[in-house]
Image (spheres, helix red, strand yellow):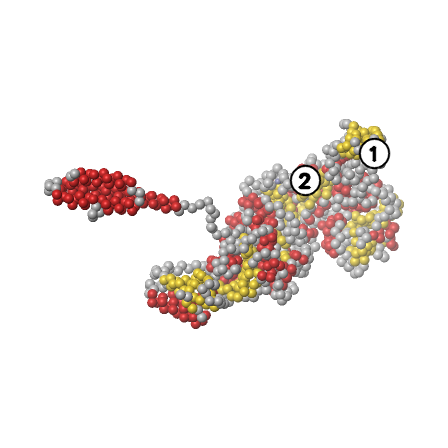
Amino acid sequence: MDLKEKLQSIEKEAEKLFKDVDDLDRLEELRIEFLGKKGRITDVLRQMGKIPAEERPVIGLIANQLKAKLNELIQLKMNELEELIREKRLAEEKIDITLPGAGPEIGHYHPLTQIINEVKDVFIGLGFTIAEGPEIETEYNNFEALNVPEHHPARDLQDTFYIDDKYLLRTHTSPVQIRTLARQKPPIRVIAPGRVYRSDELDASHSPVFHQVEGLVIDKDISFSDLKGTIELFVKAIYGENRSLRFRPSYFPFTEPSAEVDISCIVCGGKGCRLCSHTGWLEVMGSGMVHPNVLEMAGLDTRVYSGFAFGMGWDRVAMLKYGIDDIRLFFENDRRFLHQF
Amino acid sequence: MRVSYNWLKTYIDFPYSPEELAERLTMAGMEVDGLEYLGEELKEIIVGEIIRIKEHPNADKLVICEVNTGEEVLQIITGAPNVVEGAKVPVAPVGVTLPNGMKIKAAKLRGEPSYGMICSTDELGLSEERAPGIMILEEEAEVGMRMVDYLDLDDYVLKLDLTPNYARCLGLLGLARELKAMQGQGKIKYPAIDLEETGEEINDLIAVEVWDEDLCPRYTGRIIKNVKIEPSPEWLQKRLAAAGIRPINNIVDITNYVMLEYNQPLHAFDYDQIAGRKIIVRRAENNEAIITLDDKERKLDDEVLVIADPDKPIGLAGVMGGANSEITEETTNIFLESAYFNPVNIRKTAKKLALPSEASHRFERGIDIEKVVEAGNRAAYLMQKYAGGEVVRGTIDVYPQPFEPLEIELEISLVNKILGLDLTVTEVREMLERLEFTVVKQDEDLLLVKVPSYRNDVEREADLIEEVARIYGYNNIPVTRPESKQQGGKTFKQKLEDLTRDLLIGSGLDEVINFSLTGETSFDRLNIPEDSELRQWVRIKNPLSEAYAVLRTSLVPGILEVLANNAKRQIEKMAVFELGKIFINQGEGEPAREVMKLAGGSIGYLRDIWNSGAPDFFYLKGVLESYFNRLGINNIEFKPVKVPYLHPGRAAGIFAGEKELGIIGEVLPGLIEKLDLKQRTAVFELDFELIQQEVKLEKNYQPLPKYPAVERDLAILVDKDVNAGDLLVSIKERGGELLKEVNIFDLYKGDQIPENKKSLAFTLLFQAEDRTLRDEEVNQLFGNILRELEKKYGAKIRG
Ligand SMILES: [Zn+2]
């Protein structure tokens, strides 16, 4: 066999062998066998001395081409094998991605906090700030300054817890109106969320401790129509765009005219159901134009300034929004309840 | 107030159904919070006639009746002893449910079929005691007629929840007047008063002296002689019953009836029991007493107004009559009082004696002083008509200062400004006149309005503006929004509250809200000593119960109760916090201190990083450390502290520098069971206002380090009682500026460690801002630290 034939047979053999290789060690073995210093191609080239000088360049060329071809084959095979290995490792590292995550446990906001945060957001967007006042109030701020004299029947509307002759537990957040008027000049635009107390036995719909949020707007030229617009915006933000509203004459000693705000029932939409006592309407808040007596007691000129106020029980807002039928749930803090919010 | 729909209709015509009327009144400010059909329970009961009675073949005490109900003849078996042929009786056919809940079914009684029931009065809910037999109806009852019609129960009652400014509507005539204004038309049909005065002059029979005009601005009276006390007519009794007032006898019923018509409480005295033929209206003497109509003795004082004769009080003015002058079956002559009493005084008396009545309710709210005589006349007329009385000539009327109507100036521009409307002076005038206000004077922009005597709720222009709004319709007023002149937002404290909730909730704690009213026992259970500030409660003068008698001085009892209540429901792992106020009494007459506190608790936390057996403690501690870190409070230290309800070896005071912010610790093991906690529990409580003072939220950028850091581990053996925190302090001191960070990464006790020793491992990170640290520098610092620990704590390096 001449050298050329030898090289050709090496080529054929190598092609076959390389094709079957399935691991990197074997590939290296073959590389050494064919291309190594003592490999079979070198071996052939060593025999070059035995052939005529004019044939040598031809054989040399063929040999070099073969080397290049084999190198290329090796490289391809190597890539192929490495890819296989990578795939195998990835396959081995497969996890059950349906197992639960190990994230930190996160607590839950009390539903009353969530509601009041929503309320605050709406009013802050309308330019309101948040005012606060003590829960132990003076009788004066809680009643007299709000146009409820000592022996007025309006006192019957709120059963009061008394501390002593001067102090009581505020029965509403309205005294914050008085405190705001005492320290701030118009324009005034505040809401006052807070805890209030009434001497009511605890049952599904009454609690001696509950929460209200009060609003107060005082400026030049504030009108009842402004009250309607502000409340409408708030009610729709909290209870949904589709709610209809109605304003109904009512009585609060510290507003005149006074209005109760009803929304179309969130359960039946107005057709009548148990929640709305078959009226189609739900009472959601009280409101009115600040009584001139209140403004005058605060030293404001009622010919220049007017304003409106509104207030609502925010426990009730939460009950309506979440469909909760028992106010006691808010204060029992049952984990199964808290974790629904 | 309960208002009969049919009765109201006798005073004014209106086209509304009961439902529409309820809706209209509600929208006009008189909230109707219930509508009751009086015949509701008897809707299906019909009048039948017993046409034949047969003996029951198998029972002596039962009979078989054939009852004609107009549409059919039913066989009904009854055991009633008073059945007779031809009797008209109430029949409940098969399928009907009786007021007592009994459902009538076809039945066999001793083998004979029965298709319905003949009812007794108690079965129909018409009497309370058990009737001896069936109800026999009047001869005129028509067979097949509904019992509802027979009993005149085809009526609705509107339950009005009237606010104090609608006191005038506590009488049906007042309500009729409102309806008239609402409709803008109609005529009020005033009740008949056809008095036939006879006999003597009233002044010859009685004298009235009013000693306290301020408490009794008007006192009037009439005398009606020779009345016959008997039950009042059926229709009158029914109207009273519909209004929720129990019928008593014709005289008392008439006074109540007229009160419901005119909103004028009246009182009838037995004239012959009035000594000296003289009535004195005066303040009671201190320690004077009277037995009231309810047979209770009432001790009086000089704030109470009484109606008296020269010898004794015979009634509490405006509140309740006296037993000594009560109308009895023997009464023949009546002194009928119709008066106006001072609202505040009546209210005080009714409160003081805990005697609220229909009368006091009305006097407190103010009645129509100008209608006092008319109401008295109406009652006298009814007594003449329904009690056979003879009305004596003349009326006593002590009215020293006649009513002066209030006149209010109303600027139309103000009306429009307040309501956001554009009304003309004529429009406003018409609206007010619909409500029977009189316009005395009219200018371009001004009305001078005279207020009727029954409108004592109207005091100034704002009240008139409300009337205009009401007539115009609240829902017809446009919708606008005021221009906003300021930026909304939260204060620093409010933002900090939000941030606090965010961080604690993000750390795994659930937010809870507890009552601030609590009971002393919650604190007794926590071993709070007598002299503790936590026992300086603010006390409620009129508590609902002992459980809600004081305001909380700590949030911890509430936190523990929440955990205990949840533990009872098989919750084994829970962490909660509350951000709320506590109240510390500052002594009589001083306002209490209200302090915002932040408290929390944890049970069942699993990861015990230090193998200390106190995972909840370290969990809460870690939460607080992260919290303080986020608030920029970096000088926090935990120091051992004694708290009565905390484990002495597992409690810490939390300090920011010298300031004690609060405490953290594990509940004393002895208390766990007492508090129903079931397992070890950790709690903390912090003063939120102190935290607020320490917060540093402003940030200042520090350039990032340019040179590499060198990390070294240090493992030492120390006595068990040495606090890791003290070691950290020493390490930091010795490490100086170049020691950037030191952390404990391991705590070990047990095998391979001598008894009473523990092994602690620290990671120390050294770094300079201006150069790469050389090994020698670090070695030297490290050596210094080690020597310090050896010297101070006997620490040995662990190889
Ligand atoms: Zn509904």
Name the foreground residue: B362 vs B562.
Answer: B562
Q: How many marks?
A: 2
Q: Chain of mark 2?
A: B
The secondary structure type at the circle numbered 2 is helix
Q: Image quadrant of residue B776?
A: bottom left
Q: Is residue B479 above or below residue B63?
A: below
Establish whether labels 2 and 1 are both on one chain. yes
Percent across and percent down for residue B595 are 57, 60
Q: Is residue B138 visible?
A: no
Q: Quick check: which quadrant has ligand 1?
A: top right
Q: Which residue is denoted by mark 1 in the rendering?
A: B59
Q: Chain of mark 1?
A: B
- Look at 57% across and 48% down and name the residue there: A337
- Look at 79% across and 54% down and name the residue there: B316
Q: Farthest residue in the left direction?
A: A53
Name the foreground residue: B521 vs B70.
Answer: B521
Marks 2/1: CA distance?
A: 53 Å
Percent across and percent down for residue B580 are 57, 57
Q: Is residue B386 visible?
A: yes
Percent across and percent down for residue A265 are 60, 41
Amino acid type of disc 1?
Ala
Amino acid type of disc 2?
Ala
Q: Which residue is denoted by mark 2 in the rendering?
A: B22
Percent across and percent down for residue B716 are 43, 66
Specify the quadrant that holds the C terminus of chain B: bottom left
Q: Residues within 10 Å of mark 1 (few under 14, many from 20)?
A: few
